[in-house]
Amino acid sequence: MTLGLLGALVCPLMNLFILSQKINSVGENELRVFQTAQYYMEETRSMGVIDTGLFIYDSEEGYYERCISSILDNCSAEIKVIPAKYGMHYIEVDILKDGEVIYILTGSIVWP
């Protein structure tokens, strides 16, 4: 009798624990992707000027681009620095998984 009652209480709780773990895992992955994009954004912003050794200029699109592979679990990063007027540059960090963009972080900086 008590085992049946205990089993009836434990089964729904186990489902809740499993669901909670799945939600935590998804949240942890999203946080890791955000932190990685933030890292590359800050790294790019900390440069005094555009490092042409790291960034390749795409003359057709008119921006500098840097591709980094294998940053997280099968993810890569594309960083674009888009020049604008008066020294303003827009920075876009795209995190890709299997060629599909899963996170975009944008920012700007004024460089001479």
Image (cartoon, helix red, strand yellow):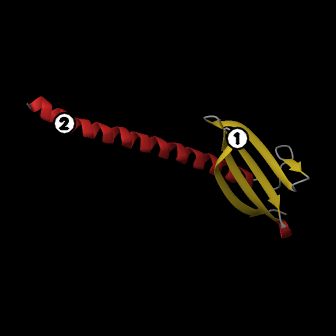
Residue occupied by mark 2: 8
Dot 2: element: helix
Q: Which residue is mark 1?
A: 99
Q: Position of residue 31 (x, y in %)?
A: 53, 47
Q: Nearer the viewer, residue 99 or 92?
A: 99
Regarding mark 1 in the picture, which secondary structure is present there? Answer: loop
Task: Decide which of tag 1 and tag 2 comes sooner along the chain.
Answer: 2
Any part of residue 79 in sight: yes
Q: Is residue 84 above or below residue 55?
A: below
- In percent of width and height, residue 42 lies at 68, 53
User: Could you tell me residue 16's position as x and y percent?
Assistant: 32, 42
Q: Is residue 28 left or right of residue 96?
A: left
Residue that protrudes farthest toward the bottom in the picture? 86
Q: Are marks 1 and 2 in contact (CB under 8 Å)?
A: no
| Residue type of the residue flagged with mark 2 | Ala
CA gap between label 1 and label 2 equals: 46 Å
The answer to whether residue 11 is above or below residue 28 is above
